[in-house]
Structures are given as structure tokens and as C-alpha cells.
Image: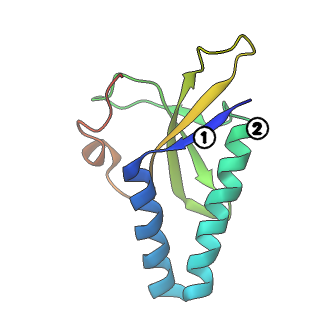
């Protein structure tokens, strides 16, 4: 069974973006962002390879991206890690960041990810 792991920066991103959305569009819309993230995470658990591989000039790992359901301008960046504990090809979906797609992603992610 696939597992989800949200790293600290991604967790902070969710709170920051939900807060921004709530301030700009109302509390209800901010709460909807949280719900949309959860829905999208469940989708990634079911279809982990659904996201397109996003190449960065300064990142050596394979990073995928997928839109937050209902908030298409927000992108979830994640990577897939093989779960070496079982033979059933289980994956861990590690959510790395959740950001607005209009940001300069090359600059934002400079030195961000490393192979562990």
C-alpha cells in the first residue's frame, strides 16, 4: 500500500497558501484549499505516477508536479520513493513543496532537494 509523507516545508506551504487564500477570498475558500490538498493527496496515493516529471537545472532527483484539485494554479511537487520493505511495489509519495505556479520555480528550488 502506498504511503504519503509531507515534509516540513510542504506543510508550511499549505498553511501559508491557505492563509493567503482566506485573507484574499474569505475563510471558506481557505478551508476549501485544505480540503483540496487532502483530496489531491488521496489521488496521488491511488495514482502516484499521474504527475509529470518536472526537470530543474539544479536538482538531480526526479521531481513530479501535479495541480491541486480545484486550485489549478497551485502545484504539488513530489517524488516517489520505493518502499524496500515489501515486494508489492509499494511507494512512498514524498510531498516536497506546494506553491503557486507563477513563482520562479528554478530560483525557489535552488539547492532545495537532495538525494537521501
Q: Distance between the residues labelled 2 and 1?
A: 11 Å
- Placement of 31 over or under 83, stated as above or below: below
Q: Residue at x 40, y 23 (%)?
A: 61
x then y, percent, for residue 28: 62, 85
- Position of 42 with respect to 95 (left or right) is right
User: Which residue is the site of mark 1?
Assistant: 4
Give percent across and percent down for residue 109: 30, 42
Residue found at x 55% / y 89%:
26
As displayed, is residue 114 above or below residue 102? above
Front-most of 26 and 53? 26
* Residue lying at the far front of the rendered structure: 85
When asked about the image quadrant of residue 31, the answer is: bottom right
Classify 10 Å Cα crowding around label 2: few (below 14), some (14-19), many (20 and above). Answer: few
Residue drawn at x 70%, y 39% is 45
Extreme-top residue of the structure: 87
Residue 103, picture quadrant: bottom left
Secondary structure of the residue carrying numbered label 1: strand
**Is residue 100 in view from this perspective?**
no
Q: Position of residue 5 (x, y in %)?
A: 53, 41
Q: In this view, does 18 lie to the left or right of 35?
A: left
To which residue does mark 2 refer? Answer: 46
In percent of the image, x 60 and y 81: which residue is there?
A: 29
Q: Do the residues labelled 2 and 1 touch (CB within 8 Å)?
A: no
* Dot 2 or dot 1, earlier in sequence: 1
Q: Is mark 2 on a helix, strand or loop?
A: helix
Q: Is residue 26 visible?
A: yes
Placement of the N terminus among the 4 image quadrants:
top right
Q: Which of marks 2 and 1 is in front?
A: 1
Q: Is residue 20 left or right of residue 84?
A: left
Amino acid at each position: 500500500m502506498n504511503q504519503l509523507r509531507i515534509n516540513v516545508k510542504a506543510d508550511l506551504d499549505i498553511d501559508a497558501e491557505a492563509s493567503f487564500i482566506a485573507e484574499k477570498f474569505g475563510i471558506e475558500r481557505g478551508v476549501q484549499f485544505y480540503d483540496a490538498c487532502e483530496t489531491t493527496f488521496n489521488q496521488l496515493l491511488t495514482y502516484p505516477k499521474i504527475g509529470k516529471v518536472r526537470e530543474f537545472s539544479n536538482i538531480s532527483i526526479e521531481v513530479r508536479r501535479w495541480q491541486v484539485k480545484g486550485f489549478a494554479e497551485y502545484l504539488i511537487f513530489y517524488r516517489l520513493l520505493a518502499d524496500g520493505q515489501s515486494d508489492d511495489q509499494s511507494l512512498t509519495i514524498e510531498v516536497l513543496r506546494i506553491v503557486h505556479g507563477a513563482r520562479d520555480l528554478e530560483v525557489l528550488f535552488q539547492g532545495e532537494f537532495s538525494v537521501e
